[in-house]
Amino acid sequence: MSLNSFGHVFRVTTWGESHGPALGAVVDGCPPGVALDEAALQLWLDRRKPGQSRYVTQRREPDAVEILSGVFEGQSTGTPIQLLIRNADQRSKDYSEIAKTFRPGHADIAYWQKYGIRDYRGGGRSSARETAARVAAGGVARAALAALAPGLEIRGYMTRIGPHAIDRARFDAAAIDGNPFWCPDPQAAEDWAAYLDALRKSGDSAGAVIEVVASGVPPGLGAPVYGKLDTDLAAAMMSINAVKGVEIGEGMAAAELTGSQNADEIFMGNDGKPVYSSNHAGGVLGGISTGQDVVVRFAVKPTSSILTPRRTVTLSGEATEIVTKGRHDPCVGIRAVPVGEAMMACVLLDHLLLDRAQTGGARGPIG
Amino acid sequence: MSLNSFGHVFRVTTWGESHGPALGAVVDGCPPGVALDEAALQLWLDRRKPGQSRYVTQRREPDAVEILSGVFEGQSTGTPIQLLIRNADQRSKDYSEIAKTFRPGHADIAYWQKYGIRDYRGGGRSSARETAARVAAGGVARAALAALAPGLEIRGYMTRIGPHAIDRARFDAAAIDGNPFWCPDPQAAEDWAAYLDALRKSGDSAGAVIEVVASGVPPGLGAPVYGKLDTDLAAAMMSINAVKGVEIGEGMAAAELTGSQNADEIFMGNDGKPVYSSNHAGGVLGGISTGQDVVVRFAVKPTSSILTPRRTVTLSGEATEIVTKGRHDPCVGIRAVPVGEAMMACVLLDHLLLDRAQTGGARGPIG
Amino acid sequence: MSLNSFGHVFRVTTWGESHGPALGAVVDGCPPGVALDEAALQLWLDRRKPGQSRYVTQRREPDAVEILSGVFEGQSTGTPIQLLIRNADQRSKDYSEIAKTFRPGHADIAYWQKYGIRDYRGGGRSSARETAARVAAGGVARAALAALAPGLEIRGYMTRIGPHAIDRARFDAAAIDGNPFWCPDPQAAEDWAAYLDALRKSGDSAGAVIEVVASGVPPGLGAPVYGKLDTDLAAAMMSINAVKGVEIGEGMAAAELTGSQNADEIFMGNDGKPVYSSNHAGGVLGGISTGQDVVVRFAVKPTSSILTPRRTVTLSGEATEIVTKGRHDPCVGIRAVPVGEAMMACVLLDHLLLDRAQTGGARGPIG
Amino acid sequence: MSLNSFGHVFRVTTWGESHGPALGAVVDGCPPGVALDEAALQLWLDRRKPGQSRYVTQRREPDAVEILSGVFEGQSTGTPIQLLIRNADQRSKDYSEIAKTFRPGHADIAYWQKYGIRDYRGGGRSSARETAARVAAGGVARAALAALAPGLEIRGYMTRIGPHAIDRARFDAAAIDGNPFWCPDPQAAEDWAAYLDALRKSGDSAGAVIEVVASGVPPGLGAPVYGKLDTDLAAAMMSINAVKGVEIGEGMAAAELTGSQNADEIFMGNDGKPVYSSNHAGGVLGGISTGQDVVVRFAVKPTSSILTPRRTVTLSGEATEIVTKGRHDPCVGIRAVPVGEAMMACVLLDHLLLDRAQTGGARGPIG
């Protein structure tokens, strides 16, 4: 993982800024012969697309993906796949007043300090628009996983917006697609709508927690010590804009358990595969998948581009206040759900290929 | 980051198992001319060494580090530094009964499923002994940072054991070295001692939360998008044994804040550098250090090697119960404090060198 | 270096096929603040462009480069630079008859064996068109080198076509741009013209040797053992299509010298820098630049797409003969000159940045 | 490939200096379950060992290899394998007079200029002793290849010493082990003995050419564009001390052929696999193995540590002459034969694993 690339053998390099002509991803190392076309990728991009409800940015971007290389007659060829997404609705004028003033909580000041130059028309590389490229790359990963690990499924949803968490007793997977928040608890979704409507009116924003679960993951993915599956998942999620925490399985709460509570007891299933009494581990032991559901959770901070005035300084060091108009997400975490799913897909495929390299996919038998 | 290596240009590769003859690290990319000797590294290893209180494993390991290459007449030469630590007290017989039975919550079963072979005398690469090599490598990183970033300081401490968190109102940095838990809250340290004594007697173990803070970090370290400073910190900490969650700054709790609460307002300090009203960001914006304290927190799950009987299966698939005798850490999080510090040192040096590569260390002026 | 990427910290990833809609390169790790625009890159691309004489392919490609990201107001921002070049003149029908028959000496059969799928409309990734992306990336490297190492110059030229080598006694740098072969020996250029005219008529092709020299290279670039400057130069040149041999300095002929002949004796120059009696080493000792000219030479095999009938097999394993019509280079080595220059620029910049990372660019004084 | 590591997924990191206590290699990514012990590795090391004839250095090094990790009960476990070789006969006093004077043609001056510090007791990392670690790592690669690609054989030999090349008409594979030069032409071996005896007496040294051939290589290893098999072979060989040129198949001489001469015509063999009329390509087309013999050749320059006086400068910049006493190889190319074999083994295994990652080892059928 270095600068703008991600992955070991399934390697994604993203490029492009929020206010340039286009952005995209080069996907290197995809297996050959994977069925792939633009329509299949567009499905995933449409889930992340802005402007789909009043709770996300009103920027109008079709996010139409073009495949410029690496696919021939509907199949991947094994060569690099260039995925290009044009920026349609840059509307730079919205950003003119932030050219010389740093937004508190935003990457503006850090970019300036490091590079001494920045595309002040928007967030540049720090914009959430970069994540469109990840979703496109994740679509490629999903297509490859469909061929190599049939039965593997990835599902993301939100578990918290601001102070309001879901009630797990009401968890209903079927509800996830039925509200603008990918919320598995219909009652929480109503609370969130009311909460966000009030926040939007007051010109403020909210944080969120997203959970991504992969089921049907083969055992044996991941490797000690710095190539752990959970190490790469943590990096993948933390690399998403605005993410401030990542958890695997029990996560931070594991600190509050005793060893006897935390141990997932092991039994033999009827199919000769191990089953577990619980999944505190989140499907990963010693950095290697066990066959249980892989469970990752991450927190997205509230958008820093808000209408509430905040004190800050200008490029020339003068004290001032800033109010960020533009068209921003009142809860950027909502659109992070398909992004988290995409990163999960990329990491799992990468480790599936890495494991195939080292072990050939053979497995030590139990029983 | 791939399998057993970590870092971009300051690159650490660790090797060795808990019950082999030795373990160690090769450190590649260290700047030349850094003052370095075995005594300087030993200081850090002694902090992680087992057997220093009744709250950690009673295995007796001197953890004496030998420098086999890359240092000449007390200075690094710029070539790879091999750090070797001999295992002294393997006492393999303790482990004989776990050779054929998987410990719930332990990497045993995952290693077996992936590799079809494992060093059943101990945890092999999944053992916390691997972290001795990290601490040695971190010592090299600290020596280089002392030369390149004078004033940079790294300090780790525990903030929680099991259900007992510190009270931040009682935070006293001077107290950290005064108890066996690196606890900055002397009263919490007493509670922890009592709690762990009881747990040990009942043959159980406890989880913990560690916080590592780096102050004096130059602005500009880290890079978008997959080379973010926080991405690499998350990976670094998640790669430590038993870690299940990583947080930067506000961490998971950032989800509960509004944008106006979370924004760290900016002012100009008397020295012409920006100062901030708060540090929800944990010193990192857009993946790049701002000059504020870099704050990382991680949760360590309770040791899975416990005396409390747990249900499990054998290699041949038979149901059984297991009690792990051996000499295990009742709270492995305690010894993770110097490990977290070492990882912070490695990541910061790596990004300092990477930034020097790309920008030459020049900084965009403010004011 | 992995699959379609090249470089350590200045990292180039190319993508695209000869008969797809476009090809290009993502350049990651470029220093910020480098003056850069499309016109500056186009200068280099125009040197490699097909159709400029009767000795190269008659395919008509404007090879116009678009910068889609990473440049703002005429300067690099330090974020990834996407360089896109549209394919204009694919004329796929020319290739229809080679869809099912393997060209001897061509990558066709190897791609088929590996991937089980290939873009039969042309060479796909194995086409020399891929090198347009390298030349564009090399233009970025040159712009950065102009800022970081003023005085560094890179010049390529041909020293052999088929049986006809230049006479070094007639070497005239001013002549290089005065003939269609980048030939520093005007008399050899005339011989080559006659030789190639005859070959073209007989439907055959010729091999070539290219030499690339960088002067003004700072000492200290490169590192032991696998990061040697010459290691990376060898990889860079061997990765160019059709290259079968790479030499540094004396090259293969070094085997015929004695130690006393080969030793470049050292003196102190008037400017306090070492000077050498000769340059058998090609400017690199122990993998590290010495300040002398860096000299690389590589051999390009003759194009395998020829009109002379060759025996081969079809996809279905039947014996047949093939004559490759299409529009191919009678001597593909000619257009490899700007490609070799571009690879030299990329490698030197990458090592200059790597050296800056590790040593800060400080140098051990002599005298 | 970066600094002291080599390989993509089978990754070797070497460490250690000629005059330190030890040197070695960490081998990461080895498949699990490979039969491996110290005796198997020692066989290869003994071939490279100094002091075996009067034509190589008289330094006495047992080069006994210890496996410190990654092997359990005679099998690789899939975790890093540390291979340690102690330096026994450093005899630093031989080098005392070169501490302050640079040897022409040697890495001394380049190391000094880059690092400002060097281990003046010997060549440090630039010493040919580093290659012992490569041979040990190559032994691991060979063991893995024996399991994964039975029938694959690697054989190296010399084809030239100084002005004397072998006569290919006299090539006799059975002769290779029958002389101190790994020479397949017994008559050439006699010429070489006489030539080197004379050179040794005059205090001079000779260059050499080594050829390494791998037969039984599966088709499909290697990948476009920067991950070509020949790209990595070129890098691997050029990274060996004193190598100045690398050739694949026809090599530099490919420039002198026409396309019709160079094309290896294709036929179907009786076993349904393609056979070729010739092997100008050296077994690699488009960067991918075809199943033909993979043929690599490299030139080793004459040792720069010679008794013939050469003009040079001191650390303080004074003009002087140097005569290097010590115990040096009159023809260091001799001991490069097992080193070249080891690098071939590492590259082939790495690409076999990489190919298994991407394609699963499936092959497009012909016929």
Image (cartoon, coloured by chain):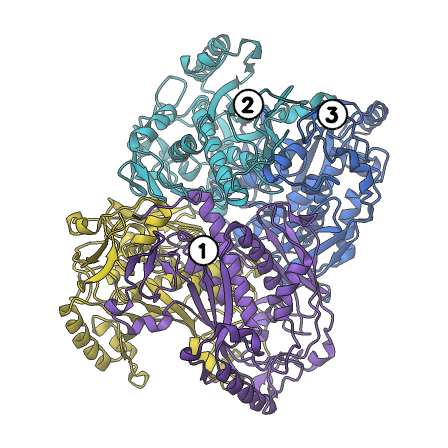
Chain colours: A yellow, B purple, C cyan, D blue
Instruction: Determine whether label 2 and label 3 are within 8 Å by CB.
Output: no
SS at mark 1? Answer: loop
Q: Position of residue B294 (x, y in %)?
A: 42, 62
- Identify the chain of the residue marked 1, using the numbered disc in the image: A
> Where is B122 relative to B135, above or below?
below
Q: Alpha carbon of mark 2 to alpha carbon of mark 3: how far? A: 28 Å
Q: Alpha carbon of mark 3 to alpha carbon of mark 1: how far? A: 46 Å
Give the image quarter of residue A342: bottom left
> Where is C145 relative to B190, above or below?
above
Q: Disc number at residue D255? A: 2
Q: Mark yes or no: residue A84 visible.
A: no
Local packing at callout 2 (Cα closer than 10 Å; few below 14, some 14-19, many 20+) is: many
Instruction: Determine whether label 1 and label 2 are within 8 Å by CB.
Output: no
Residue closer to the observer: D294 or B2: B2
SS at mark 2? Answer: helix
Give a yes or no on whether discs 2 and 3 share a subunit: no
To which residue does mark 3 refer? Answer: C259
Q: Identify the residue at image location x=34%, y=44%.
A: A116
To which residue does mark 1 refer? Answer: A7
Residue closer to the observer: C93 or B273: B273
Label 2 sits on what residue type?
Ala
